[in-house]
Image (cartoon, rainbow, N blue to C red):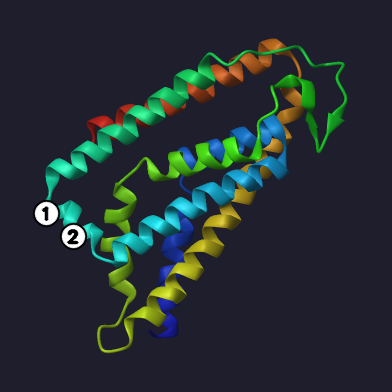
């Protein structure tokens, strides 16, 4: 892999990772509700799922999904159903007026129910894993930057590490943005509106995934 190839990969990954999607929305939402520390757990959940899916893709699962439309369709619809469920859950989440509650880590703690670390990690993992197109994306995107005449495992490891750094950097950008929103979420009416918008966007992602062509 040449240096110019690596820089091209960095530039393209930077743009792809910056694009708002379910992962970024979830991390921003968790940060706004529970603080940046909690969003780090969400980041770990998302990255664990993404790295697992990309490793599976490298092992040949991408080719399997491409050659088995029924399997891909089943996974895609299951992922869409989960995003829709998450959207409805967020939409219907109870809200409380916390304008007089003490703030910790930049977030008014009484504004939303506390979540366990495991629940945040699990939810983030499932959101990231809900889109099987990540496997196809890795199968189609990564090989463009791997030279066939050189050892492929080290090249894949470099690309994966580079992707991780860029993706996590954007996670923190969205997390900080979410934390800044927390000051406005102390009032129950504002929190309710935030829940409706966030839940609606998740349902929108689900609809796009369910209707997208494979």
Q: What element carries label 1?
A: helix
Q: Which residue is labeled 1 in the image? A: 67
Residue 190's image quarter? Answer: top right
Location of residue 27 in the rendering, given as x and y in whole percent from the top left corner = 58, 40
Location of residue 125 in the rendering, given as x and y in whole percent from the top left corner = 48, 44
Along the horizontal axis of the image, is 17 left or right of 103? left
Up the image or down, 98 lies above or below 118; here it is above
Residue 78's image quarter? Answer: top left
Up the image or down, 34 lies above or below 7; here it is above
Give the position of the N terminus as an image quadrant.
bottom left
Q: Residues within 10 Å of mark 2 (few under 14, many from 20)?
A: some
Give the position of the C terminus as an image quadrant.
top left
Residue at 41% over, 69% down: 9
Up the image or down, 107 lies above or below 56; here it is above
Residue 120's image quarter? Answer: top right
Residue 20, visible in the rendered structure? no
Q: Which residue is labeled 2 in the image? A: 63
Q: Is mark 2 on a helix, strand or loop?
A: helix
Residue at 30% over, 61% down: 57
Residue 148, visible in the rendered structure? yes
Pointers 1 and 2 in contact (CB under 8 A)? yes
Q: Residues within 10 Å of mark 1 (few under 14, many from 20)?
A: few
Which residue is at the far bottom? 149
Location of residue 112 in the rendering, given as x and y in whole percent from the top left corner = 70, 22
Residue at 43% over, 71% down: 159
């Amino acid at each position: 892999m040449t240096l110019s190839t690596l820089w091209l990969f960095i530039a393209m990954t930077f743009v792809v990772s910056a694009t708002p999607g379910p992962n970024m929305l979830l991390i921003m939402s968790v940060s706004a509700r529970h603080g940046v520390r909690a969003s780090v757990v969400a980041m770990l959940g998302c990255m664990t799922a993404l790295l697992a899916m990309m490793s599976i893709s490298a092992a040949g699962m991408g080719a399997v999904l491409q050659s088995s439309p029924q399997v891909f369709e089943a996974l895609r619809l299951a992922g869409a159903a989960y995003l829709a469920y998450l959207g409805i859950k967020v939409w219907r989440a109870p809200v409380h007026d916390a304008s007089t509650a003490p703030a910790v880590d930049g977030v008014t703690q009484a504004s939303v129910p506390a979540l366990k670390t495991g629940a945040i990690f699990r939810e983030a993992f499932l959101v990231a894993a809900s889109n099987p197109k990540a496997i196809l994306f890795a199968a189609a995107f990564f090989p463009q930057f791997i030279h066939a005449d050189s050892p492929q495992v080290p090249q894949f490891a470099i690309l994966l590490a580079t992707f991780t750094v860029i993706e996590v950097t954007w996670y923190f950008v969205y997390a900080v943005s979410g934390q800044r929103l927390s000051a406005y979420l102390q009032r129950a009416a504002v929190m309710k509106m935030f829940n409706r918008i966030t839940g609606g966007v998740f349902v929108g992602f689900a609809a796009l995934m369910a209707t997208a062509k494979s």
